[in-house]
């Protein structure tokens, strides 16, 4: 069984998977995001960075449909998005992890990962109640897929452990697993390494790169650890006070004076 | 001691190599599981026929890749079916597998590659491949790395590293053209050919490559399997390193008898996998059994009162009658009934939770096992026995027969093994399993193996009245008292260390009249005792000097003396005086090795004043020592140390 779904087009012009055009988002009088445009290529690792309150998480929430921007266009996979609910967007192939872990604490790792297969289960209540036959078949296929993810993330030993009993670093890994279970075209990671020690960060970096490499999944991530960002991302977009102040490959961004100023905090 | 006769050398006429046994098993048990591995949450299995097919395709693939007779194939990885198949696949072509420890660092790996001149490396995953590639510049002889798990390997140069399945596919192509080739290749080897090279971990100096022939491995494995009545229906879980001789012997027994080898899902899941498989044949070093027991005890203390009471009552019953029952002695009807009830409510569920529910035979070896631990498992009805062996002997030198199991001995000579005790107490053996040579090291070979085939074990021991071998100590550590009697420090120290409140002990006696001891208390256990008894203390030093602690240790030492009395050879080694050291012996201070072995020379030197005080009858002694903290700072501890006399027992008193 192959879990490969998309591969990066290495030759020529890369294909744009997600295109954000002139996005503005405000809550009442507070402008969270002002006129931001950027795109994400198919198969790349795209980092979104910026100081606290720059609008990074809002941006992610816009991408996965939790917030609806007042202005601007969102193009995903060649189609323009118009007023969709987050679950509809999940069906389109966008999965995410959260800054504060949002797993079902009382459920086992396996069950948590199975919830990630939600978008791939379509037998209705009748079949589920009958169980034997199609519903069981579907469960077996989904379980097999989830087992590949367990193998991939090396969490066999905690398969049956309730998530609430696991240490923080492992919970983060499980959350990544749940997002992967959805077999997303675009994976959004909100601070995947926050609060981790060096070893856990190294592991997580390896998993992110392996996900990108093995499954060809496009990844957009928010991260504060600049070392990590510079090492693993292909392109970086920098936000500050709801505006885009930089965009490009890691080296260019690192040497950009505006970016340096924003991070060191010169007077505005 | 003369060797017992071997009536049947091989499982069948001419079945003297692994490849021949493989074909034989594929014919005899085509649909029986030969190997299982838990992957993706379920047990994947391969029958003997399927294993033969996997090995055939891989082996032919290796031939396509240019492997020659006599080439070495380095194998590095965890217990995975493909790692085991690779060994036989190499042997089919007359190449020699060299399994190595998967946690070895790149430099250690480089040494083994260079020394064995390995042309091919079979690695489990990216981690291992990276290690090989790291040292590849310095090891030009390596031509190709073949990996099992393709994860993360997409961007590697395929002329350097190829997928196992790619090689298998090449083999399949050759198979299609020459369908008889594999059978032909399998029939080529002979019993006296080299079958494997195992590198010993080497506590001193560089690792040595122990060359074993098919006869060494297979005759030894088969004889042991016959003695213990193993059949094709047994099950074993292989979770110890593939480079370790024990693991290799168990796999060899699987080839001899046709039973199934199970591989765990990952290192962390061994306990759970064991419960699921329920092996009938099991090996674990003493510390594993010890760990399991401690775990049970801790969890029982947290259990509900009624469970705790049931546990302690029925464990009492088990202690009284369990061992006799296991050894088939006659037991009263009531005891039998109580044991049956106990088995239903306690022993059965407990054994099941430990994954030992179906175990018919469990081996332990490697170091001394505490009598209490040993008895615990035996009283539950688990037939755990000790054996004595080493890489050089293809494991089995002696083993305990059923019904003659004692914590302190390692049993009778295995079939075909002759034992000889040298004048200095060292154990020598001559056996069909005795190794061929150390690879490219004639000097060491000559030092260890005499022209007549006797092999020096480096262990001191003796044969007791029942004809059982008892290992006392490493031969080089054994000394003599002034009156010429044997002094075996580690033996006495181990006895002391079985007490939970004694962490470490160092005994003296070589070239002296009596035996004396330094004791280190176990801060965890004694601290716990202090807490329960409202004894306040601020430091290790203060707790160690507490008179009640001294009293407690004195009791233990007297018990050790009492038990030494029972031993004719060692009754002279009773401890007459001891002291509790003011600091813990520590590897940071160089007093222990990193693997927690006592450095005797250094301790003799550093604590000379204390040793003198032990022997000159002083009641206390002042000492000042430097200690190093983990961050490298150095400080000193000083203080007076009390020395205590202990009651010793005389053999005359025992007789009266």
Image (cartoon, coloured by chain):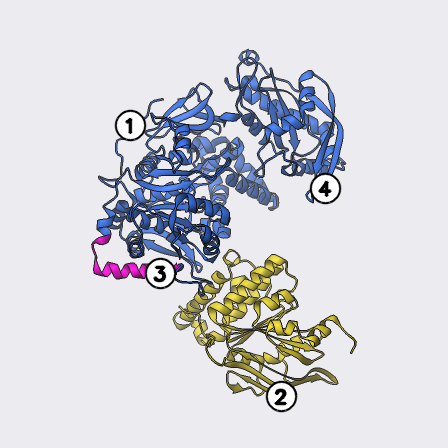
Chain colours: A yellow, B blue
User: In terms of depth relative to the viewer, which is nearer, B468 or A44?
Assistant: A44
The 10 Å Cα crowd at callout 4, few under 14, some 14 to 19, many 20 or more, is few
Mark sitting earlier along the chain (4/3): 3
Is A126 drawn above or below residue B408 in the view shown? Answer: below
Q: In the figure, residue A108 lies in which quadrant?
A: bottom right
The residue under label 4 is B633
Q: Mark 3 lies on which chain?
A: B
The residue under label 1 is B5
User: In terms of depth relative to the viewer, which is nearer, B417 or B311?
Assistant: B417
User: In terms of depth relative to the viewer, which is nearer, A104 or A154?
Assistant: A154
Question: Residue A112 at x, y = what percent?
Answer: 54, 66
Mark 2 vs mark 1: in front: 2
Q: Which chain carries label 4?
A: B
- Quarter of the picture containing the C terminus of chain B is top right
Alpha carbon distance from label 3 to label 1: 46 Å
Q: In the figure, residue B310 lies in which quadrant?
A: top right
Side of B529 relative to B454 (left or right): right
Q: Name the mark on residue A72.
A: 2
Alpha carbon distance from label 1 to label 4: 63 Å
């Amino acid at each position: 069984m192959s879990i490969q779904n998309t591969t990066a087009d290495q030759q020529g012009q890369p294909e744009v998977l997600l295109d954000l055009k002139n996005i503005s988002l405000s809550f009442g009088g507070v402008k969270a995001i002002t006129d931001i445009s950027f795109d994400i290529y198919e198969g790349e690792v795209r980092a979104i960075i910026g100081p606290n309150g720059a609008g990074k998480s809002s941006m992610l929430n816009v991408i996965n449909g939790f917030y609806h921007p007042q202005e601007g266009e969102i193009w995903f996979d060649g189609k323009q998005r118009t007023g969709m609910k987050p679950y509809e967007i999940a069906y389109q192939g966008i999965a995410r992890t959260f800054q504060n872990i949002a797993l079902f604490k009382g459920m086992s790792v396996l069950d948590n990962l199975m919830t990630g297969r939600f978008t791939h289960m379509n037998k209705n209540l009748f079949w589920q109640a009958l169980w034997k036959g199609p519903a069981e078949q579907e469960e077996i296929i989904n379980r097999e897929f989830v087992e590949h993810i367990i193998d991939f993330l090396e969490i066999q030993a905690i398969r049956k452990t309730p998530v609430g009993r696991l240490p923080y670093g492992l919970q983060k890994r499980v959350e990544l697993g749940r997002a992967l279970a959805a077999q997303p075209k675009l994976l959004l990671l909100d601070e995947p390494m926050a609060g981790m020690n060096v070893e856990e960060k190294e592991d997580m970096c390896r998993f992110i790169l392996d996900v990108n490499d093995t499954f060809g999944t496009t990844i957009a991530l928010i991260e504060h650890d600049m070392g990590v960002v510079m090492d693993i991302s292909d392109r970086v977009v920098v936000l500050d006070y709801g505006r885009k102040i930089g965009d490009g490959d890691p080296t260019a961004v690192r040497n950009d004076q505006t970016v340096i100023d924003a991070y060191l905090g010169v007077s505005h | 001691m003369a060797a017992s006769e071997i009536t049947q050398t091989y499982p069948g006429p001419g079945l003297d190599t692994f490849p021949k046994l493989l074909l034989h098993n594929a014919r005899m048990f085509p649909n029986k599981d030969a190997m299982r591995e838990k992957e993706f949450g379920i047990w994947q299995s391969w029958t003997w026929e399927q294993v033969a097919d996997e090995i055939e395709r891989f082996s032919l693939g290796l031939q396509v890749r240019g492997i020659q007779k006599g080439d070495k194939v380095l194998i590095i990885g965890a217990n995975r079916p493909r790692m085991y198949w690779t060994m036989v696949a190499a042997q089919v072509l007359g190449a020699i597998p060299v399994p190595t420890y998967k946690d070895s660092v790149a430099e250690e790996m480089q040494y083994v590659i260079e020394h064995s001149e390995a042309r091919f490396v079979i690695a489990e995953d990216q981690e291992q491949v990276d290690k090989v590639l790291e040292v590849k510049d310095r090891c030009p002889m390596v031509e190709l790395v073949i990996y099992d798990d393709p994860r993360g390997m997409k961007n590697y140069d395929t002329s350097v590293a190829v997928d196992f399945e790619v090689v298998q596919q090449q083999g399949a192509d050759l198979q299609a053209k020459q369908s008889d080739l594999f059978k032909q290749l399998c029939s080529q080897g002979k019993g006296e050919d080299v079958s494997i090279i195992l590198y010993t971990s080497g506590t001193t100096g560089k690792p040595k490559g122990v060359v074993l022939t098919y006869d060494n491995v297979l005759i030894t494995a088969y004889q042991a399997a016959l003695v213990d009545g193993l059949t094709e229906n047994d099950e074993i879980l292989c979770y110890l390193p593939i480079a370790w001789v024990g693991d290799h012997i168990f796999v060899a027994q699987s080839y001899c008898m046709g039973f199934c080898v199970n591989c765990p899902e990952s290192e962390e899941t061994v306990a759970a996998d064991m419960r699921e498989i329920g092996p009938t044949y099991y090996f674990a070093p003493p510390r594993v059994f010890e760990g399991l027991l401690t775990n049970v005890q801790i969890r029982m203390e947290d259990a509900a009162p009624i469970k705790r009471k049931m546990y302690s009552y029925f464990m009492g019953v088990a202690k009284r009658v369990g061992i006799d029952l296991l050894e088939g002695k006659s037991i009263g009807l009531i005891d039998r009934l109580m044991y049956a009830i106990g088995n239903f409510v306690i022993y059965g569920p407990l054994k099941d939770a430990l994954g030992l529910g179906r175990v018919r035979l469990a081996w332990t070896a490697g170091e001394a096992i505490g009598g209490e631990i040993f008895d615990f498992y035996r009283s539950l009805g688990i037939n755990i026995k000790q054996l004595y062996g080493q890489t050089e002997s293809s494991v089995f030198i002696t083993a305990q027969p059923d019904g003659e199991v004692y914590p302190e001995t390692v049993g009778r000579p295995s079939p075909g093994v002759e034992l000889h005790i040298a004048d200095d107490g060292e154990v020598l053996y001559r056996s069909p399993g005795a190794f061929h040579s150390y690879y490219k090291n004639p000097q060491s070979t000559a030092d260890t193996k005499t022209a007549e085939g006797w092999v020096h074990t480096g262990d001191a021991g003796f044969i007791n009245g029942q004809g059982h071998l008892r290992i006392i100590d490493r031969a080089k550590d054994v000394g003599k008292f002034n009156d010429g009697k044997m002094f075996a420090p580690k033996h006495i120290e181990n006895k002391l260390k079985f007490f939970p409140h004694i962490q470490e002990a160092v005994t003296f006696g070589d070239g002296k009249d009596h035996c004396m001891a330094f004791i280190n208390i176990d801060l965890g256990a004694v601290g716990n005792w202090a807490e329960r008894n409202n004894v306040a203390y601020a430091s290790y030093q203060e707790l160690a000097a507490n008179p009640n602690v001294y009293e407690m240790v004195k009791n233990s030492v007297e018990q050790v003396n009492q038990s030494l009395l029972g031993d004719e050879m060692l009754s002279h080694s009773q401890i007459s005086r001891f002291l509790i050291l003011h600091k813990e012996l520590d590897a940071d201070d160089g007093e222990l090795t990193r693997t927690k072995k006592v450095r005797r020379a250094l301790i003799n030197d550093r604590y000379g004043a204390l040793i003198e005080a032990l022997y000159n009858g002083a009641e206390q002694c002042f000492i000042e020592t430097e200690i190093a903290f983990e961050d490298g700072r150095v400080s000193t501890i000083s203080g007076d140390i009390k020395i205590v006399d202990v009651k010793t027992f005389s053999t005359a008193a025992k007789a009266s």
